[in-house]
Amino acid sequence: MTFPGIGLQSGPSLALSPDGQTLALQAWTDTTRAQAEIFTVRADGTDFRKVHGPFRGGGFADIMKWTPDGQSILFVAQGEPPAVTPRRVMRIPAGGGPAEFDGLDIMNLSGSVPIPRIENIANIDISPDGSRIVFGSRTVSTYDLWKFVNLLPLVNAPR
């Protein structure tokens, strides 16, 4: 299927609605791959339309899902620079409209075990009842600098 979107750089995210009748796609709309838009098209190729955007986002193939009831589309967006730019899961009505924060923000995670600093959200999935979301990510590399006191005598000690 060829989509009629003029100026679309690519469509890295695709999600089929629960009833199998509508495809949502997210495509970059600029050459720097920083601005994205979300479109829907019927499975027969008709009714191609923009439902949201532009917004900062994109990058991974599995960062957009339909809610189980088919009423909304969840996607990952990034805040605007120069502020801290966390990735967050946002929700739009399936027919289009403004995005609303849906509760997952990588800057505000907590848990019973230490959580490393997360760099992105690489993919998302939703439980069948819509009550839980799972995501994959890449953590930010961390490095330690250690100082060893009096190490040289130990290295040069006879064995």
Image: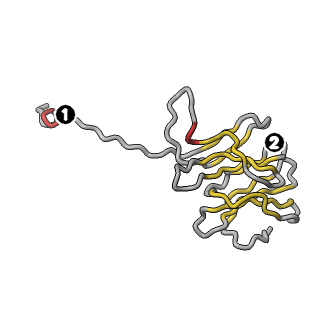
Residue at (74%, 47%) from the top-left corner?
Answer: 91
| Residue 121 position (above or below residue 48) | above
Q: Quadrant of the N terminus?
A: bottom right
| Residue 65 position (above or below residue 52) | above
* Residue 8 image offset from top left, x and y in percent: 70, 69
* Residue 46 image offset from top left, x and y in percent: 88, 65
Residue at (53%, 46%) from the top-left corner?
Answer: 138
Q: Is residue 129 left or right of residue 85?
A: right
| Residue 125 position (above or below residue 13) | above
- What amino acid is labelled 1 in the image? Val
Distance from disc 2 to disc 1, alpha carbons, whole Å, reads 59 Å
* Residue 81 image offset from top left, x and y in percent: 54, 56
* Label 1 CA crowd tier, 10 Å (few <14, some 14–19, many 20+): few
Image quarter of residue 4: bottom right
Closest to the observer, 77 or 129: 77
* Label 2 CA crowd tier, 10 Å (few <14, some 14–19, many 20+): some
Closest to the observer, 129 or 72: 72
Q: Quadrant of the C terminus?
A: top left
- What amino acid is labelled 2 in the image? Pro
Identify the disc placed on residue 136: none
Closest to the observer, 111 or 105: 105
Q: Secondary structure at mark 1?
A: loop
Identify the disc placed on residue 149: 1
